[in-house]
Amino acid sequence: MTPHSATTTDATGPSRAEIDSTLRAVLVDVLGLEESEVAEFDADTGLFGHLPELDSMAVATLLTEIEDQLDITIEDDEVEGEMMESYGALLAFVEAKTVEA
């Protein structure tokens, strides 16, 4: 995997590639998905409502694990349906949170 752009990497936080890799690993661990399946996810891959493993209970576990792995805090009022609709939306949300941290 090649880095997207050196300008998107913050010296004090994880790079976009690191965030992507961590997020994929969390999806595998929390949802019990195959690594090969998650490796094929792109920005338009549907999550909530598309993956039977990702139900409302799994969302809470997934978000908690993302917080732990990336050392971020996700407030309850930040959790919206749109952020769980696709892999790209979730990745963008998590990237924005790592910049805030």
Image (tube, rainbow, N blue to C red):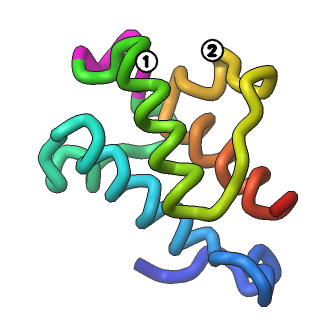
Quadrant of image for the C terminus: bottom right
Look at 43% across and 37% down and name the residue there.
Answer: 62
- First of labels 1, 2 by sequence position: 1
Q: Which residue is nearer to you in this view: 59 or 91?
A: 59
Residue marked by disc 2 = 81
Please name the amino acid that badge 1 sits on: Phe
What segment carries the magenta color?
46-52
Residue 90 location, x and y as percent? 58, 38
Residue marked by disc 1 = 48
Look at 19% across and 45% down and name the residue there.
Answer: 37
Residue 14 quadrant:
bottom right
Residue 44 location, x and y as percent? 48, 33
Q: Is residue 38 magenta?
A: no
> Main SS of the magenta segment?
loop
**Left or right of 58 in this view: 5:** right
Q: Residue furthest right?
A: 100
